[in-house]
Amino acid sequence: MVMPIDLRSDTVTEPGPAMRRAMAEAEVGDDYYRDDPTVARLEAVAAERLGAEAAMLLFSATQANLVALMAHTRRGDSVILDETCHIQNHEGGHLGPVCGLTARLVRSDRGIIAADSLARVFQRSGEVLYAPTSLLCLENTHNAAGGVAVPPAALAALRAEADRLGLAVHVDGARIFNAAVALGVTPDELFRHTDSLTICLTKGLTCPVGALLVGGRDFIAAARRWRQMVGGGMRQAGVFAAAGLYALDNMVARLADDHAAARRLHHRLAALGFGVEAEPPATNMVYCRLPQRVSDGTAFTVALAAAGVRVNPPGGGRLRFVTHAPLTPAHMDQAAEIIGRVLDETAKAA
């Protein structure tokens, strides 16, 4: 049986034999008591790579973002976010019900928020009519913007304006290593303008579970209580911390291969014709708009899956293709050929 080319997300990767061995052989202890040496090592390595004082292991990037929001704010505060960001749209709506926060939404330019837009939605404390704004949330890479990497200069400008307004800055950096590789900078250059940052170990880095929250020592200490409150306390977590250590040492540099595969797929999709509008990829995501003849995007994705290419149903009229290990340029050529064939069949059936 030929395995389908799965382009739904870079979370569909599987740990390879070396990562599995690291997990099986991990030295463990009870993380509640801070006795797990592998967790401690992973947290220390992550903090060092990002140039942060401390780090904390969590189950997922969504949980890490949630804990960061709770640690940075007080119930009743408001938070500035891009209207298309992951925290606002794809984390179960925790901002209000769980955190007790109000969203102050701004519109970004392909994932990059203009610094002068913050003041327009900022609400000062001391006014009984308003929810005081205490936090700015950013996303890097920015998923909905096409996997765009936000450069250090843009982060520095936002940091300066946040300081002027008295805001803390949190970055949903689930794919922060993709951003660093794409921009040709070290990860610490993307952290230094922030107060906290989330790293996802399962997006492109092939870990089966896990995320990290990095920040100041006092912030991480406070965040541990919030992690416990939302059910994030762990015991022998060294089993999956070992996967994270392996990933940070062995899986980051190869993200450049995913970016190259995305460029290859974009080139092939752009050459298809059929009215396909493929957006040039910034990292490992290719977004495209389907031609008008494809009236039912969900049915099209079902047909694609039957032909051997798996993608998520379109959102906002766009399909997303995400490259990841172990897919190669040859897989991209094959995927484009299948997409073209299904488009041709769709046209003939119209």
Image (cartoon, grey):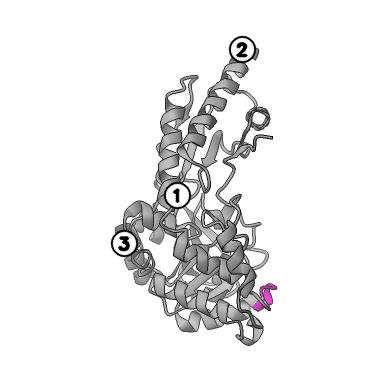
Mark 1 or mark 3: which comes first in sequence?
Answer: 1
In the rendered view, tell whether residue 99 sits above or below residue 308. below
Residue plotted at (43% across, 27% down): 270
Disc 2 secondary structure class:
helix
In the image, 134 versus 154, the foreground residue is 154
Instruction: Point out which mark residue 157 bears.
Output: 3
Residue labelled with disc 1: 107
The disc labelled 3 sits on which kind of residue?
Answer: Ala
Give the left or right position of residue 79, taking residue 51 as reference.
right
Packing grade of label 2 (10 A; few <14, some 14-19, many >=20) is few
Res. 166 in view: no
Q: Is residue 106 magenta?
A: no
In the rendered view, tell whether residue 152 sits above or below residue 323. below
In the image, 280 versus 242, the foreground residue is 242
The quarter holding residue 57 reads bottom right
Disc 3 secondary structure class:
helix
